[in-house]
Amino acid sequence: MRKLSIEDFKSIMLAGAWSHEVNVETVDTQHREEHIYTADGEIAETRHSEYVHGYANAVSSCEDITVTYEEQWSFIKYDEDSFDADDGHWSLDGAVIIDEDGDEVAIDWVIEDIDDLDSDFTEIDYSGLELTETKDIDVQASDVDRTMTIECNSGPNIRFTGDRIAAAASSDNNASGSSYSGSTGLWTELSLYKTDKGHYICHKVECTRWQGSEDYSSLETCDSLEAVMQFFGHDWLAKDLYENGEIEAITYVDDEEVTMSDNTITLKVDNQPDLRFDGECIGTASSSDNNASGSSYSGSAGRWTELKLYKTKGGRYVCHQIGYTRWQGERDLYKAKVCETTEEVIKFFGHRWLAKELYENAGIEDVTQID
C-alpha cells in the first residue's frame, strides 16, 4: 500500500486525473404516527407519514487510489423541506497518509486543510429521489392564470384549474372571540376549491408558531359535497366554511327534504349536521347569567343555558340545548337529539330544575308512579 506524505496527498487531490462516480441508496422506509393533542390532553388528530432514509457517496479514483465521501440522508415523503443530510465523512483506499514522524493521519483532517478542492469530490445529485410528487387533476393548459398547485404533507401535491369557493380560519389569539382555536400559537385554515370539471379539492392547514413545529397540510379530492363534509367534518370551523361557500350541512329530521316555509325550523348542532324540519316549539326554559335574577341564576356569571323542545310535522320530538357564553375566547355550545317518545326527551334533558321547568311549559309529566 502506498504511503503518501500530507503534501503529496494534497497535490494528488488537486492535480490528479480523477474520475468520479455518485451513488444514492435508499436503506429503509418507516411508517410514523404523530398525535396532535387538544388543550385538554385528548388526541385531536393523528398524522401519518413515511420516513425515508439512506446513504449517498461520491467515489473518486486516481490510478490505484480511491477517495470516498459518504453522507447519511433522510426525509419525510411528500415534504421536500424535510430533506436533511449530515456533514459526511471521508475514507481512503489504496494508500495511507503519514505525517513527518511517520504516523498515519486521518483523511478527514487533511481534506479540511485543502483549499479549492474540486466540488466533484463531494457533490451529490439527489434529484433522483422522489422528495415530492404533483398530481394533475382537471388541468386546463390554456388557462394558466387559474391553474394552481396546492401543497400537501400527507400525500402528493395537487395541480388543477379552478377557483377557491370557500375559506375559513380559526385564530391563535385568545382575544379574537369565538374564532379562538383554543391554543395560543396554533390555528387552522380551511379552503375548498372547485375544478372546472366539477371536482372538489379540500385543503386543511394546521398552522403553528411553536418553535420546533411546522405547519402541516392535508388534501383530499372529492366527487361530491357529501365527501367534502366527510373530510372536513362538522365542527364550528367546518360549518363556517360551509356557510361561506353556501353549502348546506343539514339532516332532515322527518327523513325528507323540507320546502322552506314559515313553519321550517333549522337548529344548530355541534359536531354533526344541523337539523331541519317543519314543526313548532312546544316548550322552552332558560336560566340567567345575572346573579341578581334569583332562582333562575345559572350559577356562573356570563354563562347560561336555554332549553327548547319541538314537535315535528311527522310527530317526532326534537330536543335542543344551547349553552350561551359572554366570555372572551369561548363559543356557544349546541346539543340536540331527535326522540320518538317523551321518555326519550326526559332522558336527554334530565331532571334538574331547568329541565323540569321545560316539562311544565311543554305539558310533560316528569313523575314516578308509586302504587
Image (cartoon, rainbow, N blue to C red):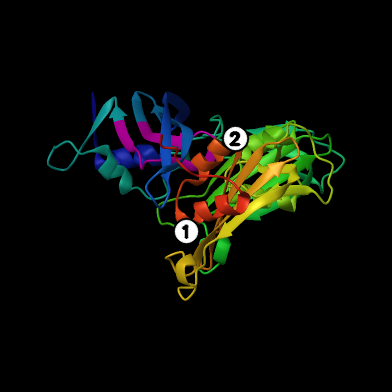
> Mark 2 Cα within 10 Å, few/some/many (few <14, many 20+)?
few
Above or below for 364 versus 140: below
> Mark 1 Cα within 10 Å, few/some/many (few <14, many 20+)?
few
User: Can residue 219 be seen by looking at this rendering?
Assistant: no
Ranked by sequence position, the earlier of labels 2 and 1 is 1
Which quadrant of the figure has residue 102? top left
Q: Position of residue 334 (x, y in %)?
A: 57, 51
Q: Quadrant of the N terminus?
A: top left
Q: Residue furthest right?
A: 142
Above or below for 356 versus 341: below
User: Can residue 49 be seen by looking at this rendering?
Assistant: yes
User: As shown in the figure, which amino acid type bears the numbered disc 2?
Assistant: Thr
Write the start and end of the magenta stretch as one range. Answer: 68-91
Using the numbered discs, state the Cα–Cα distance from disc 2 to disc 1 in whole angstroms: 50 Å
Picture disc at residue 341: 2
The dominant secondary structure in magenta is strand
Q: Quadrant of the C terminus?
A: top left
Which residue is under mark 1? 209
